[in-house]
Image (cartoon, rainbow, N blue to C red):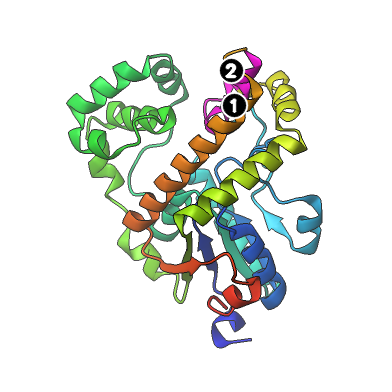
């Protein structure tokens, strides 16, 4: 074991969906004696299993996982909560003389943990409900008028991001872009020797892996899982309904499109999401890129990380 592992500093494995992060993190944890902390905004929810590619019971038996299944569908979860719970998990893992390994694709969670959240205010439930009731088009008009910088950069098709930006603007009276830029530069320096890797594949390889994953999700019962989750309040949880796969299946169950069209749409949305993830990590990650090829073995990849 090398000197970095011997003091149990965290390792961060990020990247787009279907890049192979979970398999690599699992093998790395077994190799060096580590435990995995999920950095995925959807895997925190109980019941969102198939559609989020949540680690299986067997994988969790092989290596302890943290920050999975910690919220009901009736609960909200945000980056501030992630930081608090992740810091607690890191301390507990290190106390067991193990290495914390962060693994996931939610770029904001990586940046929030490493750099802090700045001065953005906590969510106001009453205001959030009011904003969520407004049409997305109306919110985008407000955002363009009050914060043109954020309007140009934000994913305008992601209601959750738009709602949060408007919420912060209304609560503070300041542009969201100014506050999001106010990360704490001293926080990352307090995490010495952290290693932050981002996985990337060629586009054709990435798309092929996404297609296989989506087909497997439907084969395993994504439609039935979604039907069950609807009875537990899935449709009322604005965050969970942003999870790719579930929203499209809900629309299918409402008769908006047939199953074959739904499967194809999920593949398209997943490819688009993977592209947005890569854009985020290029802009904000400050990470070491690991380029993967279809022929590389997990052990070869581990040799570049551990």
Prevailing SS of the magenta stretch: helix
Mark 1 residue element: helix
Q: Position of residue 185 (x, y in %)?
A: 31, 62
Query: How many discs appear?
Result: 2
Mark 2 residue element: loop
Q: Is residue 155 above or below residue 116?
A: above
Q: Is residue 17 visible?
A: no
Q: Quadrant of the N terminus?
A: bottom right
Q: Is residue 72 above or below residue 41?
A: above
Q: Is 237 a magenta residue?
A: yes
Q: CA distance from mark 2 to mark 1?
A: 6 Å
Magenta segment boundaries in residue numbering? 235-254
Instruction: Residue at 33%, 32% (x, y): give it.
Output: 165
Crowd tier of the residue under label 1, counting other residues whose Cα lies within 10 Å: few below 14, some 14–19, many 20 or above: some
Residue at numbered disc 2: 257
Q: Residue 177 versus residue 283: which sits nearer the camera?
A: 283
Q: Position of residue 147 (x, y in %)?
A: 21, 32
Q: Position of residue 273 (x, y in %)?
A: 46, 41
Q: Is 258 a magenta residue?
A: no
**Labels 2 and 1: the sequence-earlier one:** 2
Crowd tier of the residue under label 2, counting other residues whose Cα lies within 10 Å: few below 14, some 14–19, many 20 or above: some
Instruction: Residue at 43%, 19% (x, y): give it.
Output: 132
Q: Position of residue 300 (x, y in %)?
A: 60, 77
Residue at numbered disc 1: 262
């Amino acid at each position: 074991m090398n000197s970095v592992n011997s003091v149990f500093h965290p390792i961060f494995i990020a990247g787009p969906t279907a890049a192979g992060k979970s398999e690599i993190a699992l093998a790395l944890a077994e190799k060096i004696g580590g435990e995995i902390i999920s950095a995925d905004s959807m895997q925190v929810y109980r019941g969102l299993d198939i559609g989020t590619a949540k680690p299986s019971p067997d994988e969790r038996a092989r290596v302890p996982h943290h920050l999975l299944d910690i919220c009901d569908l009736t609960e909200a979860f945000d980056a501030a909560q992630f930081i608090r719970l992740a810091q607690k998990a890191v301390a507990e893992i290190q106390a067991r003389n193990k290495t914390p390994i962060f693994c996931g694709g939610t770029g904001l969670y990586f940046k929030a943990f490493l750099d802090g959240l700045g001065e953005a205010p906590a969510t106001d439930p009453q205001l959030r409900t009011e904003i969520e009731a407004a049409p997305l088009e109306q919110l985008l008009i407000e955002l363009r008028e009050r914060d043109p910088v954020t309007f140009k950069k934000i994913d305008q098709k992601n209601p959750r991001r738009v709602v949060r930006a408007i919420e912060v603007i209304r609560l503070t009276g300041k542009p969201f872009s100014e506050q999001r830029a106010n990360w704490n530069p001293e926080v990352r320096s307090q995490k010495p020797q952290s290693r932050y890797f981002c996985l990337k594949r060629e586009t054709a390889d990435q798309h092929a892996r996404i297609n296989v994953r989506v087909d497997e999700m439907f084969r395993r019962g994504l439609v039935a899982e979604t039907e069950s989750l609807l009875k537990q309040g899935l449709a009322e949880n604005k965050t969970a309904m942003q999870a790719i796969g579930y929203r499209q299946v809900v629309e299918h169950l409402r008769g908006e499109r047939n199953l074959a069209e739904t499967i194809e749409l999920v593949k398209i949305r997943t490819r688009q999401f993977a592209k947005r993830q890569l854009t985020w990590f290029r802009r904000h990650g400050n990470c070491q890129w690991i380029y993967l090829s279809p022929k590389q073995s997990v052990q070869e990849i581990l040799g570049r990380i551990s």
